[in-house]
Image (cartoon, rainbow, N blue to C red):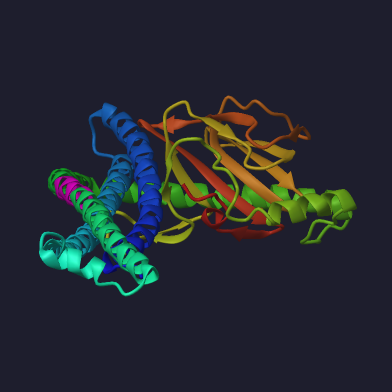
Amino acid sequence: MLRWTSILLLLFWMVQAHAQKSRTELEREKQRNRKKLEETSKILNETKEKQQATLGQLSALNEKISLQEAKIRNIGSELRLLDADILENNEVVEAMEEDLKMLKKEYGAMVYATSKVKYSDRFVVFLFTAETFKQLHRRLNYLRFYAEARRKQVTEIKKVTEALLGQQKELNSKRLAKKTLLNSEYMENTTLQGMRTEQAELVQKLKKKEKELNDEIKAIRKANSALEKLIADLIKSEIRKSTKVRNADKISLTPEAGLVSRSFSGNKSKLIWPVENGFISSRFGKQPHPVLRNVVIDNLGVKIQTNKGEKVRAVFDGVVGSIASIQGSNLVTIQHGDYFTVYSNLKGIQVKAGQKIKMKEVIGEVQDHDGIAEVQFQIWNNMERLDPQSWLLGK
């Protein structure tokens, strides 16, 4: 029959195996956040080179704060796991200490009972009062069995003692790890507070530039309107080519193009990012202005803030549709059946219209303005604009 110690240890190891799975995921998340924090810090430092408050600087700082908050939440999750482990360790240690006391008590009683028989006349009497040789043999076997039981009890005591020492060592190790994590959490919270102070100061500086920001918003709206018209015209042109019908609103797919289209749609939420490094600085659709109240900006796609000189790449296999220039920067469309991906705010274009292109193949380089490098990325299905963020692989 298994003792409670063995059962508790078995349950403890099962819980530990599950906790290890959670720790592995937390470690992966920690590594991802660390990488993203490094990327964002680099981008933020680039925006500070101009020595003036900009929306790009605020976007990078907001992203860094968000990642720092995620880092602190990760530490909190680790602490909760450790607290659960310490509680379980405590319970196992207490149960094992109780079991050890019981084993020692049983062993003491066994030794005492054996010594009373073995070192007295009763030991001899017990053996030689046997009526038959068979009975004598049974009594000898009984005494041997009793001696063996004592030896097993000693072994059991040793095993439990060793296991108990191991558990106590592990418990002390986890308490030390918790202390280290608590110190880390305090330091990260201090860092976060510093970031929030910097954020508040930056917002105040930007609010003083309200007229400049309003002028910038007007320019963005005008540029967006021109960009949307240009892209819509380019896609309409591709639709007319495929259908030979002037007012058609859908691509007429060949069997091969249909296969490409289905392959593209099947990769929703799995598409690579158009730049290797960066973060989404402006989401799809109507978004509140980060500084000005009651001001809304309608984004045609997503803006991804990245490093200066970052290479822009195709997110999926396709055919380069159009290359156009608008307000001093370039855009490229790539057709994937009846889907189109659009990459704008580029320079140094490295592709040609009609060229077949593979995923990850470089299209050009992101163009920067006032120290802010941002690529605008869009996805269209025929004439319908889609939210690109829901198509991109999670970082």
Residue extent of the magenta highlight: 166-178
Residue 125 location, quadrant = bottom left
Tell me if residue 169 is in the magenta stretch. yes
Q: Is residue 136 above or below residue 355?
A: below
Q: Residue at (60%, 47%) from the top-left corner?
A: 271
The quadrant of the picture occupied by the N terminus is: bottom left
Pinpoint residue 253: horizontal percent, then vertical percent.
Answer: 85, 55
Q: Is residue 241 above or below residue 3?
A: above
Is residue 226 visible in the rendered image? The answer is yes
Is residue 242 located in the magenta-colored stretch of the structure?
Answer: no
> Quarter-wise, where is residue 183 in the image?
top left
**Residue extending farthest bottom:** 131
Question: Where's residue 51, x and y in %?
Answer: 23, 29
**Residue at left offset 55%, top offset 53%:** 388
Viewer-nearest residue: 29 or 357: 29
Q: Nearer the viewer, residue 121 or 369?
A: 121
Q: Nearer the viewer, residue 308 or 162?
A: 162
Residue 365 in the figure: left or right of residue 194: right
Q: Is residue 166 above or below residue 360?
A: below
